[in-house]
Image (tube, coloured by chain):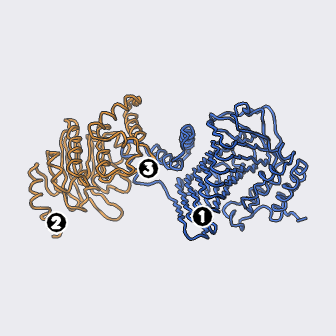
Amino acid sequence: MVKLASEAEAAFSSFYEEMKTKGATGLRSAAWDAFSSKGLPNRRVESWHYTDIKAAMSKPAPLAIGRAGVETARTHDSIRLVVLDGIFRPDLSNLSALPEGVKVQSVRDALAQGTPGVMALIASADVQTDDALLSLNAALMQDGVILRVGGGVTVEQPIELASITSSDEAQSSFTRSLVIMGKDARATVIETAGALSAASIQDNQALIVRLAQGASLNLFSHATGQSEALVRVMSLVAHLDERATLSAYSLIEGAGLLRRQIFARLDGERARVAFNGATLARGRSHADTTLIVDHAKPNGESRERFRNILDDTSVGVFQGKIIVRPGAQKTDGVMQSKTVLISDSATMNNKPELEIFADDVQCGHGATCGRLDKDQLFYLTARGIPRKEAESLLIEGFAIEAFDGLENEALRNFVSERVTKWMSGRTA
Amino acid sequence: MLEIKDLHVSVGEREILKGLTLSVKAGEVAAIMGPNGTGKSTLSYVISGREGYEATQGEVRLNGENILDLDPAERAAKGIFLAFQYPVEIPGVATMTFLKAAMNAQRRARGEEELATPDFMKRVKDASAQLGVSQEMLRRPLNAGFSGGEKKRMEILQMALLQPRLAILDETDSGLDIDALRVVADGVNALRAPERAFVVITHYQRLLEYIRPDTVHVMAQGRIMRSGGPELALELEERGYQDYIAQEAA
């Protein structure tokens, strides 16, 4: 038994003792060993260099317990599945609206049953990562949703996985949800991470996505929060077979510390991924997007386009790594991160990386960081648009660029409205 | 309408305008001609209020009011319009969103009601038809991927919609072929009115065949060196700017 040094790790250890009584002992103990051999990453761990998660999680609050009587407002026209304070809540979800060919199961039930095939899906070990926070998530997962879309099924209405924290007391929650899509299945999933209270919340959530041959998933993720005391780690683990397509868009409204990390493995020929998104951060918030796109087979395509807008003393992080494995010829990858600093005191850290082990590939990356364009500002103000309004127009336009190609018009409008609302909340 | 007296303007450490005096009356079209690098664009920027173009001496009055302390948006609301030599591309901002924001911001600043969407749409449709601005252009982000001619037409479209009192055209003819030049000139001529003044900045006489000026001013060394009628433009076309450049060297 490894000796755990910190208060945090001692707390996690007691959570582990509790959770391992709830099934999936093998899965949990492997994950716990992986976590506890390293502990929470400090800043000397390269992938966590810009986000001091060890300091942020130094004092974990008690494990979340589900609660009753909470009303959650709907923001999307969707079939909604709600995970509240770490627990999947069928009573708050509209399961009856699920179309033919779509099945939902709670992760808690699946873990209790322990069916080996399902455990393998939950563990998702074929997307290799050695990320400690993801291991911690697997060791301590409380609940989540398993959403299966059958082969050949097309789901028209978006399905929303809403993960919400409501507690007024400090709490820690660990959830893991899965989206499993059969051959040639098509669907749109909206992933929302919201907080109804300003309590000190530590939330570690993972979304496992598996796309079989020819499957196509549009994924829209939206994270918000209300508190400087929020610490949220959102991991997306995606595995794609041949010709599968994942188009992911995210809108991150920074609050407290937020780390979104993406691990994608393109494990079949001609698989395609696109990760796009905008991050808005102000106050003292810290917003980190870290992704690893792993091209394992030939003719894959990946596109990453991120926009960061940082105000006040906020800190942004973008780390993007594209790996092209030996034999993954004709891989086509383009990664771009652009940042506008609205305040002199905001900080952006950009770290794009390419690891290419095949010789016939096209991969590029670009990262920029600057202020609003003075020529553009003058042009707008010279037409009579007051400076503040002109800045908002430019910022909105800049953010919206990340959502070019998002076909769902309601979601596009949603992004516009959120960005406009965010800009109207500027203090300076 | 526009009174500029002994205007000195510096950009950084360098003085560009060195005691420029110019008067333009309502209803007048004043052409400003001069060699490259003589401060013509600086003049357009200082009138419209661009940051970094500081007047160190002198004054600029619009209908008697000193405008040098106003920000660009305030000046625009008072009726100043600059048609840019190089209109900037703004990829994230939809052209229609921009047009509506500009028109309504000016209306608000003047205490007028904002335009209702149908009224706004009709105005844009009418003005764009006259200027050969296609619906497709209006659907794109502002100036993004527009050709030189399309950008200039978009400038004139904005001018037609905003109905300024003083319009400054900065090298509007640059980069235009003859057909585009005619469309742009027709657009300007359609806006000529007794209560509106134009300052047409150009390097060549060609534009002035289409937009007939009332007065012509030769600018060199950061000053107006000579003023006259339309015949002065023809003289410049024949003799070039050598007389004025020679003076500069002296």
**Is A353 or A348 nearer to us in this picture?**
A353
Vertical comparison of A186 with A51: above or below? above
Nearer to us: label 1 or label 2: 1
Write down the residue under mark 1: A351
- For this view, does A13 lie left or right of residue A415? right
Is there any visible trace of residue B66 in the rendered image? no
**Is A316 or B139 nearer to us in this picture?**
B139
Q: Please report the residue visible at 79 percent of the width from the left and 47 percent of the height from the top.
A: A173
Vertical comparison of B1 with A31: above or below? above
Circle 3 chain: B
Q: Are marks 1 and 3 in contact (CB under 8 Å)?
A: no
Q: Give amino acid for label 3.
A: Pro
Q: Are marks 1 and 2 on the same chain?
A: no
Write down the residue under mark 3: B91
Kindly state the secondary structure of the residue where label 3 is placed.
strand
Circle 1 chain: A
Q: Where is residue A272, by image quadrant?
A: bottom right
Nearer to us: label 2 or label 3: 3
Q: Give amino acid for label 1.
A: Lys
Q: Position of residue A354 (x, y in %)?
A: 59, 67
Locate the N terminus of chain A and report the quarter of the image it occupies.
Answer: bottom right
Kindly state the secondary structure of the residue where label 2 is placed.
helix
Q: Are marks 1 and 3 on the same chain?
A: no
Q: Identify the hue of chain A.
A: blue
